[in-house]
Image (spheres, rainbow, N blue to C red):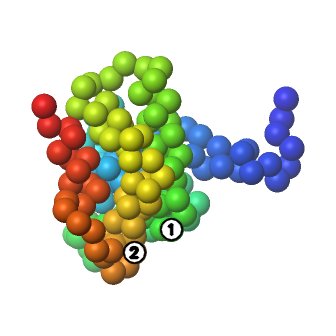
């Protein structure tokens, strides 16, 4: 059965519906990997360079990422757009499902548990921090460590 034309779910799956696109976004968001080489070598799943190049092009064309201009011999830096930042709740929902239904490493499970316990307010904090890192928005004041620092601390044994 085909999705009806204009179906929002179908349109979203068109951009985000393959494994590698979501994992690239995960690594840009949570690993702060912004360069091709960092994404390639930091991929726990072992993405192939041709697949990574293809997914980066697709994500840029879809308006999820931007690719900075790079002079000859320099590396291009990828940044999330607002549409890319808005994928965070989707990725967190997938993580919550995986937390309940799939096995995983203790450290990464603790990170997703922290996200779950923090709820929508914590996800908003993460999104604000991503806006600062990727869009140049002014940082929002907060008491204590920032949201990504808290996630990193949760990953420690």
Residue, x 37% and y 79% (percent of image)?
Answer: 137
Q: Name the side, left or right, on which 74 lies relative to 87.
A: left
In this orientation, does residue 86 appear? yes
Residue that lies at the very extreme toward the left in this rendered image: 157
Q: Quadrant of residue 121?
A: bottom left
Image quarter hosting the C terminus:
top left
Residue, x 33% and y 74% (percent of image)?
Answer: 140
The residue beneath circle 2 is 135
Vertical placement of residue 87 versus 76, above or below:
above
Q: Position of residue 58 (x, y in %)?
A: 53, 54
Q: Name the side, left or right, on which 136 lies relative to 151.
A: right
Residue, x 85% and y 29% (percent of image)?
Answer: 1
Labelled pair 2, 1 in contact (Cβ < 8 Å): yes
In this orientation, does residue 51 appear? no
Is residue 60 or residue 153 the one in the foreground?
Answer: 153
Is residue 121 or residue 89 the one in the foreground?
Answer: 121
Distance (Cα) linking label 2 and label 1: 8 Å
The residue beneath circle 1 is 82
Q: Name the side, left or right, on which 125 lies relative to 84.
A: left
Q: Name the side, left or right, on which 4 lies relative to 27.
A: right
| Mark 2 secondary-structure assignment | helix
| Mark 1 secondary-structure assignment | helix
Vertical placement of residue 125 versus 114, above or below:
below
Q: Position of residue 135 (x, y in %)?
A: 39, 75
First in sequence: mark 2 vs mark 1:
1
């Amino acid at each position: 059965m085909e999705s009806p034309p204009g179906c929002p779910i179908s349109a979203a799956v068109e951009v985000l519906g393959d494994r590698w696109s979501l994992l690239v976004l995960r690594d840009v968001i949570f690993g702060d990997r912004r360069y091709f080489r960092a994404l390639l070598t930091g991929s726990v799943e072992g993405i192939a360079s041709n697949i990574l190049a293809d997914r980066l092009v697709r994500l840029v064309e879809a308006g999820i990422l931007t690719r900075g201009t790079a002079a000859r011999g320099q590396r291009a830096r990828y940044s999330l757009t607002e549409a890319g930042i808005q994928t965070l709740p989707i990725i967190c929902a997938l993580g919550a499902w995986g937390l309940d239904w799939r096995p995983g490493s203790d450290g990464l499970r603790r990170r997703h548990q922290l996200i779950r316990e923090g709820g929508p307010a914590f996800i908003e904090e993460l999104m604000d921090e991503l806006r600062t890192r990727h869009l140049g928005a002014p940082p929002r004041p907060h008491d204590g460590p920032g949201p990504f620092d808290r996630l990193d601390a949760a990953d420690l044994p």
